Amino acid sequence: MNISFTKMATFLLAFFCCACALFSINSAMADNTVKPTTLADKVSLSVEQVEKRLQINPGSDVSQHGDFIQRKYFKVLKKPFLSSGSFEISNNQFIWKTSKPVESAIIFKNGELYFKDNSGSKKAPAQASTIAKLLQHLIAGNFTALKSSFLFYDDNNTADCVTLKPKTSAMTAFIEQIILCGEKQVDEFVLFDKNMNRTEISISYNKPS
């Protein structure tokens, strides 16, 4: 495992989840409403079973755009850190724009990744594109692309959710599991990091004009 990649992956995931905003720390424990899935007695699902379960089949041409609300729960925070913005996805592009509480963007285009904030655009190392691709595949519901890095399980609590468990060192270094929910489109996913802090992301889609 390349240590520099692990650090960059962790940084990018933190940038994505927090949008580089500043916030004050409380000593109280975070809300623990969403629990990680217990996988001990679960049977893994195939891509076809996941797509049937969620009624999702992204096909070969992916073009989506909409808005998101993101809640990041830390064990040292009493309340979640809230951010919101918009996104655009196509086969060769992923744009994640945070508008509140501060403006920033993650742009993955033509195989290159950029961060953008009030100081301008910054090109990220090539390895960091792995995380941008992960987020792109999660929102698009591209389980065929995700199967090389994750195992799929049915969720403990609801029929329209699946749990993704990382199986490669590149992912297990900083992701414990992901719970993804939706019906025909991905509506929400929850990422648990190795410290069991979680990020909840709710997605809404703009209707075609």
Image: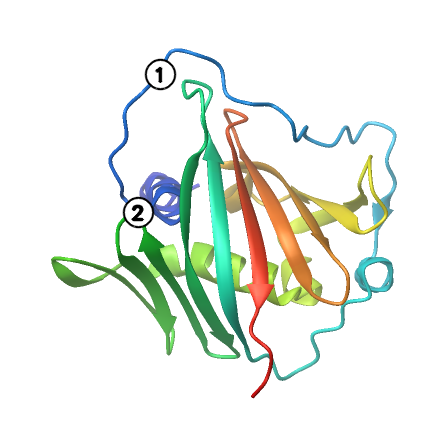
Position of the C terminus by quadrant:
bottom right
SS at mark 2?
loop
Residue 170 location, x and y as percent? 50, 45
- Does 64 sit left or right of 159 as displayed? left
Residue sitting nearer the eye, 115 or 194:
115
- Type of residue at label 2? Pro
Measured from the top left, where is residue 204 in percent x and y?
58, 63
Compared with residue 200, is residue 110 higher up or lower down, i.e. above or below? Answer: below
Say left or right for 109 vs 160. left
Which disc is residue 13 wearing?
Answer: none
* Image position of 13 with respect to 129: above or below: above
* Quadrant in which residue 47 is drawn: bottom right
Viewer-proximal residue among 82 and 53: 82
Residue at image position (61%, 67%) is 140
- Name, please, the residue furthest toward the top: 27
| Residue, disc 2 | 101
Q: Where is residue 165 in the image (x, y as percent from the top left)?
A: 67, 41
- Spatial separation of the CA atoms under disc 2 and disc 1: 19 Å
Side of 33 relative to 134 (left or right): right
* Nearer-the-camera pick, 141 or 70: 70
Vertical arrangement, residue 76 with respect to residue 63, above or below:
above
- The residue under label 1 is 26
State the residue lying farthest toward the left: 119
